[in-house]
Amino acid sequence: MLTNFFYTKSIYLGKEHHIIRYMDEKNYGRELPPLSLHLRDLINQGYPDNSIKDSGLHNANFIDFFEEGLKHIEPSKSEVNTLYREYHSYLTVGSASNSTVVRKICEAKPSPMVSTASSKKYHAQVQPFLKSLGNYFQKYKDYCENGLVIEKPETTLLIESLMKITPTTIRVREREKVAARQQAAPMTAATGNNQTRASYSSHIPYENNFCKPLDEDRYFPLDKVTDLITKASCYRNSCFYALIAATNARNSEADQILWRDINFTSREVFLVNPHTRLNPGDAYRGLSEIERNKLEWKGRGTPLTIMLEPYASLFFHYLELYILHEYQPSCGHNFVFHCKSGRPQFLCDYSTVVLHQFKNAAKRALPNQQHLASKLGLHSLRHSNIFFLKNYLEHSQGQGLTDSELLLITGHADIRSLQKYAKVDRELLLEKIAYGNSLRKNGNIKSSTEFQIQYLEERLAMFKEKLKQQNNQQRH
């Protein structure tokens, strides 16, 4: 919630973004140029739609905090830098902060009360904005010369104060070097030999999140995933949840699949990068340029997937029911999932169309764990899939897939990201997986061990062979 500004929608190069305007009576409706220019720079650099959205929202919240804070300090360089570094206290402690200024800010602008990890993410968006402020006037001049703006660069107390914020030059901590190099692979970025670096967030406690295991509320209970799927509010949601549980697809990957990405004969689903489709005009018919620019991709290296049972069978079962009872053939696009009005699901409001309905289904699936159900999000199904593959998949060579195999299946870009899925003092859950469903092929009920051995030895071998063929085709 903003106290001193309000959002308005803007479009640049076919991409939507939100700029902010002053709310006070004297400057009502005046745009704040530095943020607008920063967001345009991100668009020029090819940042995905969600990254631009996050940058706009997090920077707007920070600027609103800063504007409110300037009412309670003298705008000297020292006090301005102290106010900036108290933003972490505002985000995490709020009205209980030791800072008098932060407590006064919270009276007008309540704190979101987020974790230290979330505060780091907020600051990660603010840091590039602060770096760009140094070139603010030069950027404005360039835009004027290209006819993109006609007003002269604006100087206000807010902008002048923001430009006083300076980073801290610090020595690279040894633990950062060690953390960056642990299990480093060719695709990972490790800290080099630099002994110092400039940081806008050195005052925030350091956390090595790669090694921190997932909290219980980050993955859906493995023995309750089937209940979640069967207790969804509609066939579309059952199908959608089953797809993510079976393939560990990200939400953005799952809700962007097209009918051509499903092979009903081989019972496979492909997760395709929207920017690599051969005929995007045909694939994404019915979308405007702005809507097409909302398609996103986080870097999965192959469209191939391995579908975990029983969720694969549940996916195709509910997909058939979805087609019969809910899908609208006249919707005018090729996406599998759409809302009640026929609009592609990836363009719908995530909170109401996806998250709210997921949380209701979670509460029905976890009647005795309502607190946990309220904290779980859709991404927890992806975490559950990877957590299971990492720790409990039994096969002839042992238990749990290797990190190299998981990189292929999950689409992670950094091998260190898989450390958090390692089991830590948890009871073996393999036998709790709900295998006994009536949809199992041929009606045969196999033991979990038999099923998982077959899954690994056959499905993983097929996956690797297809991946090999795909790589050979790309070389030729």
Image (cartoon, rainbow, N blue to C red):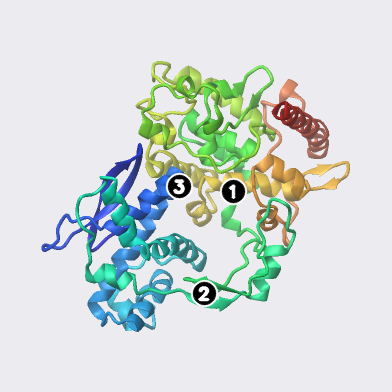
- The label on residue 29 is none
Question: In front here: 3 or 189?
Answer: 189
The image quadrant that residue 292 belongs to is top left
Q: Position of residue 32 (x, y in %)?
A: 25, 58
In the rendered view, does 270 fall on the left or right side of 475? left
In the rendered view, does 437 fall on the left or right side of 325? right
Under mark 2, the amino acid is: Ser
Residue position for label 3: 45
Q: Position of residue 363 (x, y in %)?
A: 49, 47
Q: Residue at x 46, y 36 (%)?
A: 295
Which of the two marks, 2 or 3, is nearer to us in this view? Answer: 3
Q: CA distance from mark 2 to mark 1?
A: 34 Å
Question: In front here: 328 or 333?
Answer: 333
Closer to the chain start, of discs 2 and 1, is: 2
Q: CA distance from mark 3 to mark 1?
A: 36 Å
Closer to the chain start, of discs 2 and 3, is: 3
The image quadrant that residue 226 belongs to is top right
Above or below for 437 versus 93? above
Under mark 1, the amino acid is: Phe
Q: Position of residue 153 (x, y in %)?
A: 24, 60
- The label on residue 202 is 2
The image quadrant that residue 293 belongs to is top left
Which of the two marks, 3 or 1, is nearer to us in this view? Answer: 3
